[in-house]
Image (spheres, rainbow, N blue to C red):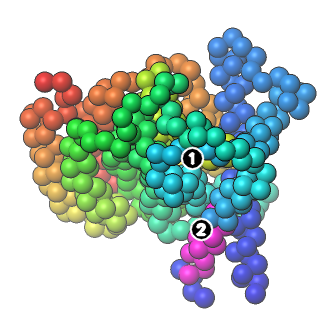
Amino acid sequence: MSELLEVILRCVLVIGAFMTLPLLIGQMEHKQMAHMQSRVGPMYAGRFHGWAQLIADGVKFLQKESVTPAAADKPVFALAPAVALVPYVIAMVAIPLGPLFGSDVLIGTDLDAGLFFVLAAMSIGVIGSLMAGVASGNKYSYVGGLRVAAQLMSYELPMVLAAASVAMMAGTLSLVGIADAWEPWWLIVQLPGLVVFFVAGLAEIQRPPFDAPLADAELVMGPFTEYGGMRFAMFLLSEYAGIVVLAALTAVLYLGGWAGPWSDQLGAAWMLLKIAAVGFVVIWARVAYPRLREDQLNALAWKVLVPLALVQLTISTLVVVS
Amino acid sequence: MGGFLDDYAVVGGIVVAAILLASAMLGANSLMRPKVAAREKELTYESGVDPVGEGWAQSTIRYYVYAFLYVIFAVDAVFLFPWAVVLEKLGSAAAVEMGIFIAIVVVGLVYAWRKGVLTWTR
């Protein structure tokens, strides 16, 4: 009975993290983008610097009508947002936060194949966008959906190769094990891998400058063109959750997870700080760089990132064997 | 329950919880949203103009080559993870073996590159 209670408690905590961290990243995106573009961003909701903007958005989304186009494949159209959202919740269960005040590592569950599990779950999320693109019966959505598919297949590979080279250095696939095995000199040895992983991760979650599937100037909103109300909000939430998962993975694999001064006491705080820092860079990239054209996008993956990831794999192999 | 099942019991729990969360979001929405019927709303969106033809159409999918390339490497990646974990124990012989395997796969990529598959306009 106590085991069942523990499972339920862990699930509730993970859902709690899922409902708060993406919203914090979303709010950060609003404010950070605004200040980087010399605006102030949301200022009214919640009175203090618009802190409640996303909650207000959520209340609005909750009450909006759900319109399904007559041309759409209705069951697939209706299910797509859930397919996009659910995998990110599942991915978050295996992501460690680190110890807090001398406790064990805070984590949903420490899986032996944690890294593999999170990468696998992340790539399922993209199928939601693909379903939305094809099922909408809209030309913009269709082109967007095709681009989603091409992008997923191109960037999955460098990401997996870079992640594998970290697993090789640590000798384990458990995310807790990897973070424990991490040492500061990995920052230098794994630098190409870090760049490849981060760039491929950005493309995987379709964040600018790799948002050719959405490309508002040419495809309106890509696969999400026909969506509104709660279903659109779910796509939005899964995008922010994607940033959280990518930032957390980057922090665990390359930045040492909860490593830092007094990590026994403040480990989880270090981890959250690193997630926020990587999230900051994700948003910064959106403001700083123009969108890549579709052919440049796929060329970058196959001609730059894959060879770079293979070089990283060779370096890691040499380090481990010697 | 063994340790393995303990670990994955939480995964099973979170799958159920995630599906419940998604249904709760959609369910709350369906309780609170208005439903005003109008045929115009269900038209396909094409930037405000009446839609031309259908959204369901055939088109050239030039992206299929990426799917081919991906399948080649995806198989490699599946072998790579278990290999990465035990590399330290197996030593340099395993490294050389994987090097040969990856080299063969890379030849495929180089071939595709030389054939101009990775270039959009020829």
Q: Nearer the viewer, residue B55 or B101?
A: B55
In the rendered view of the protein, which quadrant contains the N terminus of chain A? bottom right
The answer to whether residue A263 is above or below residue A298 is below
Q: Are marks 2 and 1 in contact (CB under 8 Å)?
A: no
Q: Residues within 10 Å of mark 1 (few under 14, many from 20)?
A: some
Q: CA distance from mark 2 to mark 1?
A: 27 Å
**Residue A131 in the figure: left or right of residue A81:** left
The answer to whether residue A183 is above or below residue A180 is above
Name the residue rendered at 48%, 62% in the picture.
Answer: A117
Question: Which kind of residue does numbered mark 2 sit on?
Answer: Val
Name the residue rendered at 60%, 88% in the picture.
Answer: B1
Farthest residue in the right direction? A47
Relative image position of residue A98 (x, y in whole percent): 67, 55
Q: Residues within 10 Å of mark 2 (few under 14, many from 20)?
A: some
The answer to whether residue A121 is above or below residue A193 is below
Question: Which kind of residue does numbered mark 1 sit on?
Answer: Thr
Q: Secondary structure at mark 2?
A: helix
Which quadrant of the structure image shows residue A97?
bottom right
Relative image position of residue A270 (x, y in whole percent): 69, 44
**Residue B51 in the figure: left or right of residue B32:** left
Q: Nearer the viewer, residue A81 or A125?
A: A81
Q: Which residue is mark 2?
A: B15
Q: Nearer the viewer, residue A38 or B48?
A: B48
Relative image position of residue A185 (x, y in whole percent): 47, 41
Q: Secondary structure at mark 1?
A: loop
Magenta-drawn segment: B5-18
Q: Which label lies toward us, 2 or 1?
A: 1
Name the residue rendered at 70%, 75% in the picture.
Answer: A7
Q: Which residue is mark 1?
A: A68
Secondary structure mostly taken by the magenta-highlighted segment of the chain: helix
